[in-house]
Structure formats: structure tokens, C-alpha cells
Image: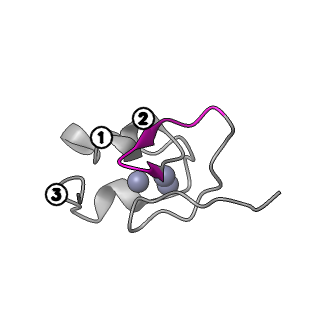
Amino acid sequence: MEKRVCACPYCECAVPETAPEINGKFYCCEACATAHPDNQPCQQSDCDCHRRHWGGIMS
Ligand SMILES: [Zn+2]
Ligand SMILES: [Zn+2]
Ligand SMILES: [Zn+2]
């Protein structure tokens, strides 16, 4: 099976089976899927994607 990577622009985490699908894209966690509101951190603690000032989901 093909390995999926999170659709958050600055995240390179692997996407788990149970990942939420939004607009046909998969995200590794709820925080990435919702564009890190209030700088909510990624499920991967050493990933700093939430600090890159991503303003919202690209449709
Ligand atoms: Zn991440
Ligand atoms: Zn992610
Ligand atoms: Zn992210």
C-alpha cells in the first residue's frame, strides 16, 4: 500500500488509516486538518509544522 503523507504544507508525517479526510486530502491529525487553530501542535511532537504560520485550509 502506498504511503500517504500529511497534506499540511509543512508537515511530513505519515497519515494513519483513521485519518480525517478533508476536501479529498488526508491529514495526520485533527490539528493539521483544521489548519492549527491557536497554534495547536501536531500529533508528532518533534514536528514544527504548526509554527510555520499556516493560515488555513486551502480549498
Ligand atoms: Zn506534523
Ligand atoms: Zn500533519
Ligand atoms: Zn500540520
Query: Which of the 4 image quarters holds residue 46?
Result: bottom right
Q: Report which residue position mark 2 lands on.
A: 30
Q: Residue furthest front?
A: 24
Query: Which of the 4 image quarters holds residue 14?
Result: bottom right
State the separation of the CA atoms marked 2 and 3: 15 Å
Query: Which of the 4 image quarters holds residue 58?
Result: bottom left
* Residue 22 in the image, given as x and y percentages of width and height: 38, 43
Q: Residue at x 32, y 39 (%)?
A: 40
Q: Three-letter amino acid code at disc 3?
A: Gly
* Residue 41 in the image, given as x and y percentages of width and height: 39, 43
Q: Is mark 2 within 8 Å of ligand 2?
A: no
* Residue 29 in the image, given as x and y percentages of width and height: 49, 39
Q: Report which residue position mark 3 lands on.
A: 55
State the separation of the CA atoms marked 3 and 1: 10 Å
Given residues 22 and 51, the one toward you in this image is 22
First to last magenta residue range: 18-25
Q: Three-letter amino acid code at disc 2?
A: Glu
Mark 2 burial class by Cα count in 10 Å: few <14, some 14-19, many 20+: some
Residue 57, numbered circle? none
Label 2 near label 1: C-beta < 8 Å? yes
Horizontal relation, residue 21 to residue 34: left or right: right
Principal SS element in the magenta part? loop
> N-terminal of the two: label 2 or label 3?
2
Mark 1 burial class by Cα count in 10 Å: few <14, some 14-19, many 20+: some
State the separation of the CA atoms marked 1 and 2: 6 Å
Q: Is mark 1 within 8 Å of ligand 3?
A: no
Q: Report which residue position mark 1 lands on.
A: 34
Q: Is mark 3 within 8 Å of ligand 3?
A: no
Given residues 42 and 4, the one toward you in this image is 4
